[in-house]
Image (cartoon, coloured by chain):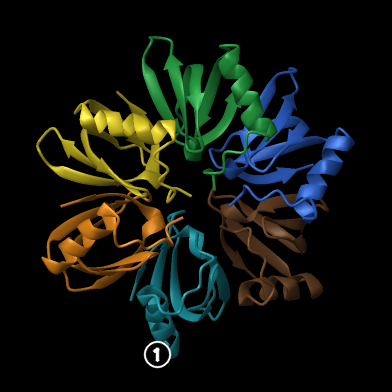
Chain colours: A green, B yellow, C orange, D cyan, E brown, F blue
């Protein structure tokens, strides 16, 4: 289950780095949607992403297939 | 699993704020459905949303892909 | 995970009320199916619904996207 | 999670009754498949169903949307 | 969650038997894929299957709908 | 749940071997996507894969159907 928020996990640390460096990412969701923008924050259940049009979107981690930088 | 209801989580706090401020949101579900309205309440498993036609709909968090404000 | 059956949860209480008041509901499933009828009982994993043609159907909560009254 | 096998649950007891009474059922899966037959046994993760052509099929509970009798 | 590997479960024992007897099986996945071959090993998260063309494939149990012998 | 990272599991050990030997793999996701490349690291929630065009992609294990070598 994705409610474990173990900051020692490489995958969690990787996203913390992306947040710190304000790196643009693409999230592919299991719905087929692709969310592009920069990650503002993450917790055990969600990412909050600032999209290109400065709109904030909260993505549930359960729906994520992959992340590309 | 989404039955953890940790009110210190940013994602839970974000929705509490949306409820308090009666903010309109759009929930995209993994079925492709988009539910628009204001969130009345949330618990560890569901959101209750008041839709535009004043109809109440209970959305299972397990089926949510993302939330837009 | 949906095996937590915490009767203090608003979402569980809401369905208990629907059962008590024999309210007609529509359940949208992640398969796209819509199950219409009245909820007979619920437990941590399933709803049992009496459909319009008096047929009983057991729906796994894991497959539910939303419930409309 | 569906690895809880609490035989006091109505949904588990319902299936135990279907097994005992050799009742024909239809299982709708999230793949869209419909499995028809009689349930031979169940555990926390699976049902074993005897299909009409006397073929045994093991269905993972995680993939079940609903059961009709 | 499928990380429970309780070897007393009928469904786990069934697959152990299939492995021992080198029985050909078909796994239907929630992607619609059908994987045919013999099961080499299983753990709490995966099956390893030897396909007909002697290629090894690791299937995540989370993605399995059903198994036919 | 896939947050259990038990390095004694055959499926975890298999991927550790693929990482060590820099073996090319194909991951089929439940979205239908096929991710090809070499696995750089894994944790309880994700794989990080170096794709053919030297792009890094983080795949959530929850979205994986199978892995071919």
x and y percentages locating residue F21 in the rendered image: 90, 36
Q: Quick one: SS at disc 1? A: loop
Q: How many marks?
A: 1
Position of C10 relative to B35 (above/below):
below
Q: Residue furthest top?
A: A53
- Left or right: residue E59 versus residue B30 is right
C48 vs A45: above or below? below
Say whether residue F18 is left or right of residue A20. right
Q: Residue furthest bottom?
A: D21
- At a point 52% along the width and 44% down the height, the residue shown is A3
> Could you tell me if residue B24 is visible in this image?
yes
Q: Residue lying furthest right in this view?
A: F21
Disc 1 chain ID: D
Q: Position of residue A39 (x, y in %)?
A: 51, 19
Give the residue pinned by disc 1.
D21
Viewer-closest of B51 and D25: B51
Image location (x, y in percent) of residue A54: 38, 10
Determine which quarter of the picture holds residue A51: top left
> For this rendering, which residue is in front, D21 or E35?
D21
Residue A69 seen in the current view: no
Q: Is residue A64 left or right of residue E45?
A: left
Residue E6, position as x, y percentages in the image: 66, 70
Query: Callout 1: 10 Å neighbours few (<14), some, many (20+)?
Result: few
Relative to A37, say whether A63 is above or below.
below
- Tell me what residue is drawn at x 62 percent, y 31 percent: A12
Return the residue found at the far front: B8
- Residue F16 occupies which quadrant of the picture? top right
Q: Nearer the viewer, residue B22 or E11?
A: B22
């Amino acid at each position: 289950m994705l409610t474990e928020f173990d900051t020692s996990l490489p995958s969690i640390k990787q996203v913390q780095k992306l947040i710190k460096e304000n790196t643009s990412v693409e999230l592919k969701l299991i719905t087929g949607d692709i969310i592009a923008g920069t990650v503002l924050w993450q917790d055990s259940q969600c990412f909050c992403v600032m999209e290109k049009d400065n709109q904030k979107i909260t993505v549930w981690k359960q729906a994520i297939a992959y992340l590309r930088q």
